Image: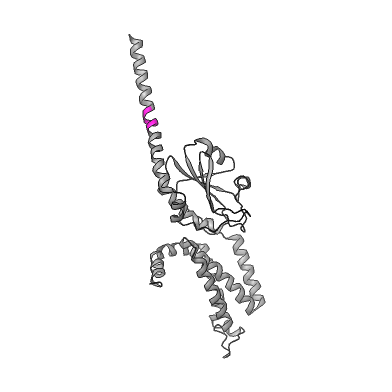
């Protein structure tokens, strides 16, 4: 059963995996991830490679290479236990495959290692993972609009994500956050985002570190009455983020989204009542004034 569950999960998400893997970023990453395998197994190339195998077969992995691959496979499995989306699973596999390739190429030939490492650096600087472009009910803030919007109507509850475009965790979380906004957004409960990688002043004011070492990205903050009520992940006294999984279930439970949504429905009725009632009362008042004027 322990083996069947991951298999069924993979088959269920297979169409989504194909959709993402066909994008140029993932196609190029896939080729880079299997580079050492291709070099080691391609006839005409592998014949000229060094090997530590007793049989002298340079077109097959030696015991040390198998050991490195098994070790990094274990790390991928551990990392993927905390992954919340298909994109994050695929991203972890690609990342650690590239790390394995760097180690294996340097062990094989320092020149090949330097060449592969250079390609990885160029790829990292020139190619970015595709951003989520699906439907959402999210308002994007700048450093000049966030305070104004939070204080505009204190009856509105805001959930704001502090993110950075360069963060893989933020990119993976984008589809989850968008899905939550589609389910729970209403007049009294709204969702917002602000890029603290772009707006450094917002990062300082709301005490969300943009450093990759802080592990505070993404951060979700709940505002009620224009004031912060809670945030995830929490930050300890030393400024370190407490580990927290950004799954949809965790967010719904921790932020009491179902309860907040039910309360916000009343505010929806209040807004709609004012919107519908005010013109009606105004027209009745004008009608009475005209009657009195006529007599």
Picture layout, residue 281 above or below residue 117: above
Residue 46 sits in which quadrant?
Answer: bottom right
Q: Is residue 32 left or right of residue 289?
A: right
Residue that protrudes farthest toward the front in the picture: 237
In this view, the residue in front, 275 or 34, is: 275
- Residue located at (53% from left, 55% from top): 170
Q: Where is residue 239 in the image (x, y as percent from the top left)?
A: 62, 54
Q: Where is residue 244 in the image (x, y as percent from the top left)?
A: 52, 57
In this view, the residue in front, 18 or 85, is: 85
Q: Is residue 110 left or right of residue 140?
A: right
Quadrant holding the C terminus: top left
Residue 2 sits in which quadrant?
Answer: bottom left
Exactly how many numbered labels are in the figure?
0
- Residue located at (60% from left, 45% from top): 202
Q: Position of residue 4 (x, y in %)?
A: 38, 71
Q: Where is residue 272 in the image (x, y as percent from the top left)?
A: 38, 34
Picture layout, residue 247 above or below residue 276: below
What secondary structure is the magenta-colored segment mainly? helix
Asked if residue 71 shows in the view, the reply is yes
Picture layout, residue 10 above or below residue 151: below
Quadrant holding the N terminus: bottom left
Which span of residues is magenta-colored?
273-277
């Amino acid at each position: 059963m322990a083996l069947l569950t991951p298999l069924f999960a993979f088959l269920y998400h297979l169409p989504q995996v194909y959709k993402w893997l066909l994008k140029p970023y993932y196609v190029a990453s896939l080729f880079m991830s299997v580079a050492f395998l291709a070099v080691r197994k391609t006839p005409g190339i592998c014949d000229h490679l060094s090997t530590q195998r007793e049989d002298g077969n340079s077109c097959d992995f030696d015991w040390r290479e198998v050991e490195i691959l098994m070790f990094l496979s274990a790390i991928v499995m551990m990392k993927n236990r905390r992954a919340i989306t298909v994109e994050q699973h695929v991203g972890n596999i690609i990342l650690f495959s590239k790390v394995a390739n760097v180690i294996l190429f340097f062990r094989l030939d320092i020149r090949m290692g330097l060449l592969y490492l250079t390609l990885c650096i160029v790829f990292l600087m020139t190619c970015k993972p595709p951003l989520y472009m699906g439907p959402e009910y999210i308002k994007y803030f700048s450093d000049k609009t966030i305070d104004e919007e939070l204080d505009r109507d204190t009856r509105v509850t805001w959930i704001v994500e502090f993110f950075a475009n360069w963060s893989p965790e933020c990119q993976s979380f984008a589809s989850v956050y968008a899905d939550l906004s589609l389910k729970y957004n209403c007049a009294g409960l709204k969702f917002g985002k602000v890029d603290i990688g772009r707006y450094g002043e917002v990062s300082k004011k709301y005490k969300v570190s943009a450093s990759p070492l802080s592990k505070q990205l993404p951060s979700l903050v709940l505002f009620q009455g224009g004031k912060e009520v809670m945030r995830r992940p929490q930050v300890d006294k030393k400024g370190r983020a407490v580990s927290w999984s950004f799954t949809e279930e965790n967010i719904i439970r921790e932020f009491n989204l179902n309860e907040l949504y039910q309360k916000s429905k009343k505010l929806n009725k209040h807004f709609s009542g004012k919107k519908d009632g005010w013109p009606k009362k105004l027209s009745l008042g004008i009608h009475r004034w005209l009657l009195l004027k006529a007599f």
